[in-house]
Structure formats: C-alpha cells, structure tokens
Image: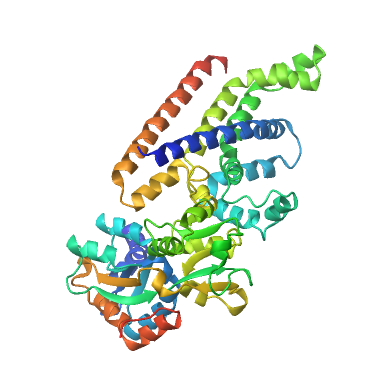
C-alpha cells in the first residue's frame, strides 16, 4: 500500500472516531427524549432522525453542499462566525457523517431505553434520586448494551460512507480523501492492485465489526 | 378460471408482444461528462431524423472505459480524449475503422462570480482563493489538461493544497457553480451552455498550454451489427450535428 493509501486509512479512522463521539453526545439525549416523551412531536422527530436511512447519500451530500456553501444558510452562519465555509474540510465531513449515521446511533440507544422501561426509574425516584441522578446512575448503565451497539454501528457506518463524502469532500489527500473515495479513485484509474488491497481490508474489517456486534448482543441477551 | 387471467396476462405481456416500428431501436451511448449538454441538444434532433432513441450514460471517461471492459451494454463510446478509445481498439473491443474525432474541447478557468477571473488567468499566480476545482486528473482528460496548464504556468506546487477534485468534470463544475469553490477548470461547453446572467467570469485557456482535447468516438463490438448505432455515428459527422456541437464551443474536424 502506498503512503497516500495509509493516509486515507488514518483519515477514515479519525473521521469515524470523531463522528462517533459527537453522535453519542448528540444521539443519547435525542434517544432519551423520544423514548420518554408523550409529546405529539415524538413520531415526527423519530421519522426525521430516520430520514438518512431512506434518502440516497447523494441527496444528503447535494443538499449539504448547497446548504453549507457560501450561498446557503449554513454557509452564511459559518462565514458570519468567521469559520469560512465547511465543504472540502474535515469539519464539513464530520457534520455530513453525523447526519448520515444518526439513525444508526439513535435507534439502538432508543431501543435500550425502551427496554429499561419505567419501573427501575420509578423505584429510583421513590429512593429520592433526582432526575439527573436517575438518568446517569440507572438509565444509562442499564442501557449499556444499546450504547455499545450504537458505538460500533456509528463507527462502522461512517467508515463505509461514500456518497456524502464524494459530494462535499473534493478528495483532498489527508483532509477529505477517505478510504471509500480512495478505493473509487483506484478503480476508476484501473489501479486494481491498490483497489484490491484496500477493498479486501474493508471486507475483513466489516466482518470483524459485525462479529463483535453479534457477540455483544449475545452476551447481554440474558439481561433483557 | 383461466379465462379470467388471460386479459391480465395480455396486459402484462403487451409491451413485448406488440412490435414497435420495424426500424426504430435504442442506441446506448456512454458519453464523457463534458458532453452532457451537447447530448441533450443532439438527442432530440437525432431522434427526429432517424426515429431511433438515444439512451445515454454519462461519466468520467476512465470509469466508462472500465465498465466497457467489464461488459457494460454500450453501443457507442464518446470519450473525452483519444487515449481510451485507442486502448479499447487495441484490446479488440471496438469495431475497427469506426474511431474518429467528433469534437475538440476547450478548457476554461471559470468562476460563477463576475470579476474574479481576469482575462489572462493571473489570478492563478496571485492565488487569493481557498479552493480551485478540477476534475480527477487521473481519469478525466479535462482534469489532466488543467494540471498541464498549472505546470506550464509554474503554479502547480503552490496550488496543490487548494485543489478540490470532482469525480468528473460535471462535479467540478457543480463545485464552482454552487460557489463552494471560487473558481475551477471546467469545459468551455459547460460555461457556454449557461444563461448569460450566470456566466460570471472566465479565462479561455490558450490551447498552447495543454495537449489538444481531441475527443474520439468509437463503435463498440456489441453494436457491430446494429444499424441504429451506426446511424448515430454517421449522424455525429453530419453537418447538422456538427453545427450543434460547434455552437457549444467545441471545434469539429474539417
């Protein structure tokens, strides 16, 4: 593998790690809210979060390109804050990836919160645990398998991302040229040896991720 | 109750049972992304004249080449250069004697904003911009030409960190049009096709700065006995087609 390929591997891991961290911070409160709320907004919000499951990544990428560009509202905001515009930057890819992988993180955490149910929280309340306390010492620990699944899925799904990155990335080595784009470029340039090395690595990686995921689920099954 | 099913069966099969006009057929064309607008204008004219229908896939020429090598069902390749058609010819995937130059493209440095690109491309040396869009130089001939121009001007090293790559020339164009890249190297035909209000500013790069962008067409093997595909090749060389192609800023061989 060439140096450029290793750069793409490193960049992909970095992007997936940052994206997963952001997603856990953003996704957990969203999942909690959807699981607990009685608001009529529950279904619309859940549907909105699930949108990236259905939309082609190129649609997301295209709208992000326009939204974050100098003529879009997002671009206006970042320019006003003196941040420049986000397409073709690592930060831009993180935003795209967070949106793209959101359902893969929210869904398992939501399921876990649902599985916890009202009862342990009510018991904790009768023991005078505050709402924050109940969330951090009861709900979160009980939802651990869901959080683990969400982490693995969020990371893996971001590694496999292609369409969004292609649309807003610009294939800059070390900044936005991730693994999937590098593979695509190799295939297009007929550099099949390079493409094979990276692609085979991806297949092995995907298998290991799924294996870990199924082992997590198995291990926690008796607790459900 | 088979008699109940029969009408349904007929409805389902009707498209296959009723023959179309005896001579009309589909021509599947793999076309370089820069030729998109030209095809949009050529297709209705061709269809009106011959009754055949044009079905076009656009992409970077390198990708189309890889697809053809792996059995893609294309009758005609309209490449963005001469190299890929020659390669296919050497690999015996074409009908011999059918390769010809159908258009010669021009490279343009373009910005969607007025007053950005000057008439000599001096902005490349000044370099006061964040992103310069190009098509992927390894697969898209217009991207390769852009790199040649930057090399000839001695700005390649300096501009490399600011290059953003479109997967093909259409994507490079989109990066510039959406304003995400202030300027970019695109096909003259793309800028020519814009309404006057959106032309912005451009520098038509002198042809001495890059190898000529001769775009070659070739009839592919699977269409050896397809009259409709041959009709399209002949049409491309006809005066009406040539005038449409030239209107978009290409030159055609005399």
> What colouring method underlies this structural image?
rainbow
- The image quadrant of residue A28 is top right
Q: Which percent across, then down, holds residue A149? A: 54, 27
Q: Position of residue A188 (x, y in %)?
A: 35, 53
Q: Is residue A63 left or right of residue A30?
A: left
Query: Taking B96 as reference, is B83 left or right?
Result: right
Q: Position of residue B141 (x, y in %)?
A: 37, 63
| Quarter of the picture holding the N terminus of chain B | bottom left
Q: Residue at x 22, y 73 (%)?
A: B226
Tell me: A133 left or right of A194: right
Q: Residue at (32%, 83%) from the top-left corner?
A: B50
Residue A125: quarter of image: top right
| Rendered location of residue A217, percent (x, y) | 50, 22
Q: Nearer the viewer, residue B181 or A195?
A: B181
Residue nearest the viewer, comparing A7 with B207: B207
Depth check: B71 or B22 in front? Answer: B71
Q: Residue furthest top?
A: A127
Task: Please name whichever residue, B27 or B113, is drawn nearer the observer in this view of the structure.
Answer: B113
Count the labels in the image: 0
Establish if B42 lies above or below A94. Answer: below
In this view of the protein, can residue B87 be seen by the observer?
yes
Question: Can you say whether B62 is above or below A146 in the image?
Answer: below
Residue at 42% over, 68% down: B34
- In which quadrant of the rendered image does the C terminus of chain B lie? bottom left
Image quadrant assignment for residue B182: bottom right
């Amino acid at each position: 593998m060439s140096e450029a390929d290793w750069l793409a591997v490193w960049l992909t891991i970095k992007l997936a790690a940052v994206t997963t961290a952001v997603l856990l911070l953003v996704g957990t409160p969203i999942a909690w809210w959807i699981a607990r709320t009685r608001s009529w907004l529950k279904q619309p919000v859940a549907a909105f979060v699930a949108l990236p499951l259905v939309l082609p990544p190129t649609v997301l990428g295209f709208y992000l390109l326009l939204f974050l560009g100098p003529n879009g509202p997002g671009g206006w905001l970042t320019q006003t804050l003196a941040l420049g515009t986000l397409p073709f930057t690592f930060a831009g890819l993180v935003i795209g990836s967070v949106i793209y992988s959101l359902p893969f993180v929210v869904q398992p955490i939501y399921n876990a919160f649902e599985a916890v149910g009202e009862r342990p929280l009510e018991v904790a309340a009768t023991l005078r645990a505050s709402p924050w306390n109940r969330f951090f010492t009861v709900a979160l620990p009980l939802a651990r398998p869901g959080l683990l699944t969400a982490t693995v899925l969020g990371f893996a799904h971001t590694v496999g991302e292609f369409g969004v990155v292609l649309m807003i990335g610009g294939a800059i080595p070390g900044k936005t040229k991730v693994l999937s784009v590098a593979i695509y470029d190799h295939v297009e340039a007929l550099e099949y040896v390079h493409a094979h090395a990276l692609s085979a690595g991806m297949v092995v990686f995907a298998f290991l991720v799924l294996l870990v995921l199924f082992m997590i689920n198995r291990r926690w099954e008796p607790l459900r | 109750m088979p008699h109940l099913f029969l009408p349904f069966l007929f409805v389902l099969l009707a498209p296959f049972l009723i023959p179309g006009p005896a001579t009309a057929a589909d021509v599947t064309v793999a076309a370089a992304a820069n030729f998109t607008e030209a095809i949009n204008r050529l297709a209705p004219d061709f269809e009106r004249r011959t009754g055949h229908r044009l079905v076009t896939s656009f992409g970077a020429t390198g990708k189309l080449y890889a697809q053809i090598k792996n059995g893609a069902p294309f009758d005609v390749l309209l490449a963005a250069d001469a190299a890929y058609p020659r390669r296919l010819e050497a690999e015996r995937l074409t009908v011999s004697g059918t390769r010809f130059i159908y258009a010669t493209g021009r490279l343009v440095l373009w910005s969607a904003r007025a007053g950005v690109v000057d008439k000599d491309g001096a902005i490349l040396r000044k370099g006061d911009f964040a992103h310069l869009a190009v098509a992927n130089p390894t697969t898209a001939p217009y991207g390769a030409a852009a790199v040649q121009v930057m090399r000839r001007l001695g700005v390649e090293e300096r501009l490399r960190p600011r290059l953003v790559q479109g997967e093909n020339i259409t994507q490079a164009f989109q990066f510039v049009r959406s304003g995400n890249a202030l300027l970019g190297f695109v096909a003259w035909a793309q800028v020519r096709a814009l309404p006057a209000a959106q032309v912005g500013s451009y520098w038509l790069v002198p042809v001495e700065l890059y190898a000529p962008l001769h775009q070659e067409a070739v009839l592919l093997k699977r269409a050896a006995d397809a009259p409709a595909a041959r009709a399209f090749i002949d049409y491309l060389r006809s005066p009406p087609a040539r005038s449409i192609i030239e209107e978009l800023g290409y030159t055609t061989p005399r």
